Image (cartoon, rainbow, N blue to C red):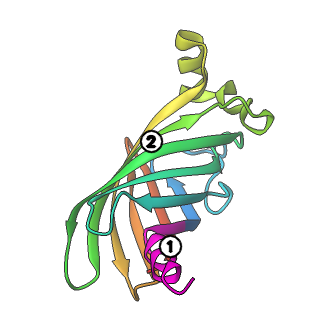
């Protein structure tokens, strides 16, 4: 039984939770988009291995039109400095899923355009940001979702 504890601890070190994101549309929001802390973003991320530059993530959020969406994506750490700074990219499908909570995600904007073309409402999210880890367990990041959405968020790790 004692031998199982380090394996569990090592596995937990691969996980992190992302919460509390702040979103600001840098192009012409005249009240039509939900922003600031109204997106209710939450995701769980798992590194592929302890020394991997890659992670998989699954999460949920409200899009700019206040519709609940599912996010499935991959993260790549492009540069990780020894002083706590990481430049990263997240590449995700954000859209409808077969659960009832996510069925309205394709009702507006680019999500609706994709739904008309493919039958599934979604938007590809391409995010690049800079993260600073204050401790092994807590980091803050800021970046841009292409083309012009400013994001700040918090990451909690189980290292």
Q: Nearer the viewer, residue 149 or 122?
A: 122
Read off the residue under disc 1.
12
Residue 93, x across and y down, in percent: 49, 36
Name the residue: 64% across, 50% down: 61
| Label whose residue precedes the other's in the sequence (1 or 2) | 1
Residue 126 found in image quarter = top left
Q: Residue at x 59, y 51 (%)?
A: 59
Q: Is residue 1 above or below residue 118?
A: below
Question: Above or below — where is 149 with respect to 15?
Answer: above
The residue range painted magenta reads 1-17
Gap between marks 1 and 2 measured at Cα: 23 Å
Q: Is residue 28 visible?
A: no
- Front: mark 1 or 2: 1
Mark 1, other Cα within 10 Å: few <14 / some 14–19 / many ≥20: some
Quadrant showing the C terminus? bottom left
Q: Position of residue 23 (x, y in %)?
A: 54, 57
Q: Residue at x 40, y 85 (%)?
A: 136
- Dot 1: element: helix
Question: Is residue 157 visible in this depiction of the protein?
Answer: yes
Within the image, what quadrant is residue 35 found in? bottom right
The percent position of residue 130, horizontal first and vertical second, equals 31, 67
As for residue 8 lying within the magenta part, the answer is yes
Q: Is residue 18 magenta?
A: no
Of the numbered discs in the image, which one, if any, rests on residue 92? 2
Query: Going by the picture, which residue comes out furthest to the right?
Result: 100
Left or right of 71 on screen, residue 150: left
Q: Residue furthest front?
A: 1
Quarter placement of the N terminus: bottom right
Q: Secondary structure at mark 2?
A: strand
Vertical relation: 73 (above or below) 107? below
The residue at the point 59 percent across, 67 percent down is 19
Question: How far across and how far down the image is residue 37, in percent?
Answer: 64, 63
């Amino acid at each position: 039984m004692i031998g199982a504890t380090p394996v569990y601890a090592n596995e937990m070190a691969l996980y992190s939770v992302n919460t509390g994101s702040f979103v600001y549309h840098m192009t012409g929001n005249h009240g039509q988009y939900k922003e600031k802390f109204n997106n209710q973003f939450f995701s769980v991320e798992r590194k592929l291995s302890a020394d991997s530059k890659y992670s998989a993530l699954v999460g949920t959020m409200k899009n700019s039109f206040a519709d609940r969406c599912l996010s499935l994506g991959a993260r790549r750490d492009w540069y990780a400095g020894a002083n706590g700074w990481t430049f990263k990219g997240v590449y995700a499908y954000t859209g409808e899923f077969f659960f009832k909570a996510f069925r309205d995600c394709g009702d507006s904007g680019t999500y609706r355009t994709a739904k008309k073309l493919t039958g599934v409402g979604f938007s590809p999210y391409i995010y690049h940001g800079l993260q600073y880890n204050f401790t092994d367990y807590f980091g803050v990041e800021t970046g841009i979702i292409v083309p012009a959405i400013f994001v700040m968020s918090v990451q909690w790790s189980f290292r």
